Amino acid sequence: MNLRLINYTPWSKVLLGILILVPLLYYKPSQKIIELIRNYPDFLRGFLGLVFTALIALILNDSGIVTVATMLLFGGVLLLLISFEELNKRSA
């Protein structure tokens, strides 16, 4: 079912973008990402748990692509919120 959904759902494009972006951030993290990981280790654990759960959903769920893309969007929002909090700390 996942292979058929790739052609029909716009979430597959979101998932493809996330699947390209996450390894790039992992293998070549910017100084900003390294700082965020050091300052917020609990959020990193939560993000890794989200990624692990998304992989399980992709394997076990019949419409896993939609589930994974939606879950990883929450991870992206989490990273944005942490980044905005850091910007507020620096500007204050």
Image: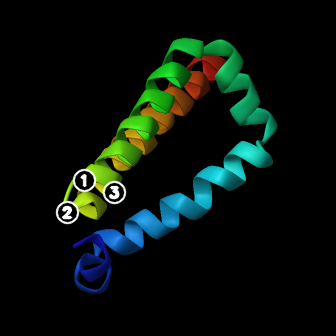
Crowd band around label 1 with a 10 angstrom C-alpha radius: few (<14), some (14–19), many (20+):
some
* Image position of 55 (left or right of 37): left
Residue 67: numbered disc:
1
Secondary element at tag 1: helix
> Is the residue 31 above or below the residue 10 in the image?
above
> Is the residue 87 above or below the residue 21 in the image?
above
Q: Which residue is mark 2?
A: 63
The quarter of the image holding the N terminus is bottom left
The quarter of the image holding the C terminus is top right
Instruction: Name the quadrant containing residue 33.
Output: top right
The Cα atoms of the two marked residues, 1 and 2, are separated by 7 Å
**Marks 1 & 2, CB-CB < 8 Å contact:** yes
The answer to which of marks 3 and 2 sits earlier in the sequence is 2
Q: Residue 14 at what x, y percent from top left?
A: 39, 66
Q: Which residue is mark 3?
A: 69
Q: How many marks?
A: 3
